[in-house]
Amino acid sequence: MRSVAVVGASLAGLSAARSLRRQGYDGRLVIIGDEPHRPYDRPPLSKEFLTGAVAEADLALEADGEDLAAEWLLGARATGFDRTERRIRLAGDTAVRADGIVIATGAAARTLPARAGGRKLAGVHTLRTLDDARALRDDLARGGRLVVIGGGFIGAEVASTAYALGLDVTVVVVAPTPLARPLGETMGGVVSSLHADHGVRLLCGVGVKGFSGGERGEAGVPTADGRGRVTAVLLEDGRRLPADIVVVGVGARPNVEWLESSGIELENGVKCGADGRTNLTAVVAVGDCANWYDPAAGIHRRVEHWTGAKERPAVAVTTLLSGGAGEPGPVRPPYFWSDQYGVRIQFTGHAAAADSVTVEEGAADDRSFLAVYRRAGAPVAVLGMDQPRLFTRWRKQLAAAGA
């Protein structure tokens, strides 16, 4: 293998490039990124970056003086892949040929249907990229009323950050219980109670019909680009929520459109084995776009968390360089964390696999506890709120048990 192309220049792509060099690959290495920025850390975008506590320079993932001896093609969007010629087509009618391919194109923020109309109004944001965060930070500095659509971790973190900045915040969730999918209904309800604890309004079980706005905002000031500014969020039940700023946080979709008709098997992202291999020779996938097989559960899962983007590329690179020989090494259970209203929330494992959940330390009402999820008596997941030391011990136990 004389050339490898990593398609995606965020954490997963950078981790793959580093793993290639660490595992002895010394050939041509091309890193392709659709954003113009060098790799940067995304978790602070919904928290410290919005408050100004973290500057853009602090987001850099590359160490000072780090040199991967790579060719960087930034601001270059992948548009297709020719499996016969092994060419990655890029916007602008250029292409990169490589013997080995690492797909790390991540995911994009989902938006509301076009009929909702928010895309035409200033003040309506999604949050996925550095440029998204810049625009949202500028709007939050204006103050006023924020409506967050979606009760996932990104939306909750933005709500928490905006509350700390002094904005009036409302969170709208179509599901009856926020965070029920990753944490289960009981613990999802407990964690989302942080909103009410701090006077942030939480409206559950109601969808968004659309937005209202016009050429001028409610203060009578036209927007610089003439789009008009959002003035309210319209709910399916007829309610109207006045809004100066809206953040749509309704999940993410894998960036795999460029692989359609390529021959790579797609199913909720790039379908992979437990070692990151795809159905094509010398093509692996990592990060938010990769739907890896989970041997413990017997199903494929797409893990959209920082830890997976950092750890799994080493496994995939081993597969790529070995030609798929040998058994994949162990992959730790998914782990993620979230900081909301000054509380550190940590979770590992799979809540959906559990048939019970019990608080084993602290008290849920105090927002400082550790809960263990079990199936047939065996631990399958752990949740901690402001219990970092105890959580870390349980996380190690869960990983050792192969849950």
Image: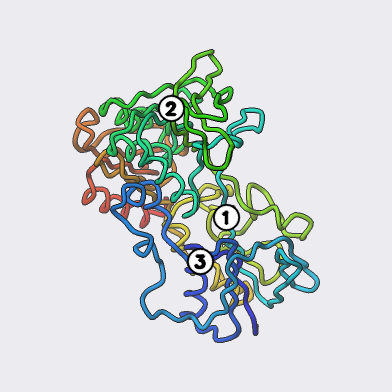
Q: Measured along the vertical axis of the image, is residue 44 above or below residue 281? A: above
Mark drawn on residue 219: 2
Q: Identify the image quadrant of residue 292.
A: bottom right
For label 1, the crowd category at 10 Å Cα-Cα, with few meaning under 14, some 14 to 19 and many 20 or more, is many
Label located before the other in sequence (3 or 1): 1
- In this view, the mark in front (3 or 2): 2
For label 3, the crowd category at 10 Å Cα-Cα, with few meaning under 14, some 14 to 19 and many 20 or more, is many
Question: In the rendered view, how is the structure colored?
Answer: rainbow
> What residue does disc 1 label?
292
Q: Position of residue 177 (x, y in %)?
A: 43, 26
Element marked by disc 2: loop
Q: Position of residue 39 (x, y in %)?
A: 47, 65
For label 2, the crowd category at 10 Å Cα-Cα, with few meaning under 14, some 14 to 19 and many 20 or more, is few
Q: CA distance from mark 3 to mark 1?
A: 12 Å
Classify the position of the N terminus by image quarter.
Answer: bottom right
Q: Amino acid at mark 3?
A: Pro
Mark drawn on residue 313: 3
